[in-house]
Amino acid sequence: MVVPLLILVVVGWLWQGVRIHSSAWAIISPGEILNIALPLLRFNSPSVQPTGTDNRSAIPGEPSQPSSWFENKNDYLNRILEGQIPLLGGRVDPTGGTLAAKTAPNRGNVSEVEGEDYPDVDIPREDPRGEGATEPDHSTASGEVMPTILIYHTHNGESYAASGGEARKEGQNGGVFNVGTRMTDRLEQWKDKYGIAVEHSSRIHDAPSYNLAYNESRKTVLEFLQKYPNPLALIDLHRDALPTRETVTISNKTAAKILLVIGTDQRAPHPHWKDNLRFAEKIQSKLDELYPGLCKGVVTKSGRYHQQMHPRAVLVEIGSDQNSTKEAETAGDMFAVALMEVLKEENLIK
């Protein structure tokens, strides 16, 4: 309540005490008025960005801004105002209530703003190839295109320290890539039976700039959609950052637990995010049916994580850095089975 009252006091003082006429308002810029009412603004110029390996911003919960943020200062000021006056950041859910009530608290696994490097980007869900596009590469002998699944890693370096290594590898694929390989191998067992193909991207996205990892993985997703405009699913595979080791034993196999993350439209346009949510919930339900206790659930976050590009795009977190690679690979194998069952139930493969 302090900041809103301060704004009212400042505006009232300018209007009544100094008796500034309406024509004189042009002399004082909106930015300067905000600087008077919200002194925090003065400490967020590009020349005084915080330093350090984590590149944290002076604004709690926000990543450091790239050097070009000043070119889009209006959006930056809006973010600051939403932080200072929370009511401004509210979003109304058409189904009733507010999204804030349905959004899980920040668990320390996926940042609330992760995936929001370029929030002005809105990609329509349509064939991105345009007119004259070439046919996809994956095809059967008869020329029929195979349904394709893409597995990629925005944070390739994420690893599993319990296997005797480090929690994150710089500039190379870590343990999470091994989990993706295990998942790919499992899915490809159904290649002949269901005519599917799996593409597992090994491209590094989180180096040299970790902060721009989502910008880089976006390029990978776009290239994939250029070739395969109607894929079965897009899986961005991560591991959790929580410093705990959670496992479940199923059929004498110890597996790391799984968390599904879905983005919303809180920070950028994402009109069909509930399609992604429904798909994730179906996967969760199937995991609960086949492997009780394996899935920790589905959480929603304010980022989009490229999920605006496809209705069956899901961010999957398998284990944490406290798990072993083997535990995560076992979970990846189980996730692949559940995913295939959901795709069959949705009549996406036959």
Image: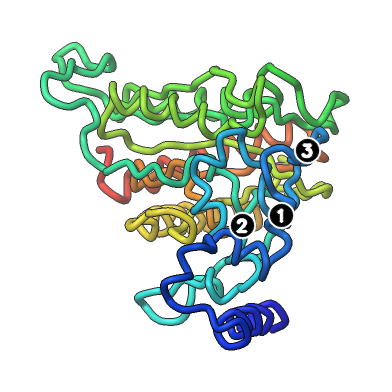
Q: Furthest-left residue in view? A: 132
- SS class, disc 1: helix
- Mark 3 to mark 1: distance in Å? 22 Å
- Mark 2 to mark 3: distance in Å? 37 Å
How far across and how far down the image is residue 219, in percent? 43, 26
Q: Is residue 187 above or below residue 267?
A: above
How far across and how far down the image is residue 13, in percent? 63, 83
Q: Residue at x 50, y 29 (%)?
A: 217
Q: Which residue is mark 1?
A: 42
Nearest to N terminus: mark 2 or mark 3 = 3
Q: Is residue 132 above or below residue 265?
A: above
Q: Which mark is residue 54?
A: 3
- Position of the C terminus, as image quadrant, is top left
Q: Residue at x 80, y 36 (%)?
A: 51
Q: Is residue 342 above or below residue 23?
A: above
Three-letter amino acid code at the position of disc 2: Pro
Q: Quadrant of residue 150?
A: top left
Which one is in front, 331 or 43?
43
**Viewer can see residue 298:** no
Label 2 Cα neighbours within 10 Å, binned few <14 / some 14-19 / many ≥20: few
- SS class, disc 3: loop
Q: Is residue 239 above or below residue 2?
A: above
Q: Residue at x 44, y 43 (%)?
A: 339
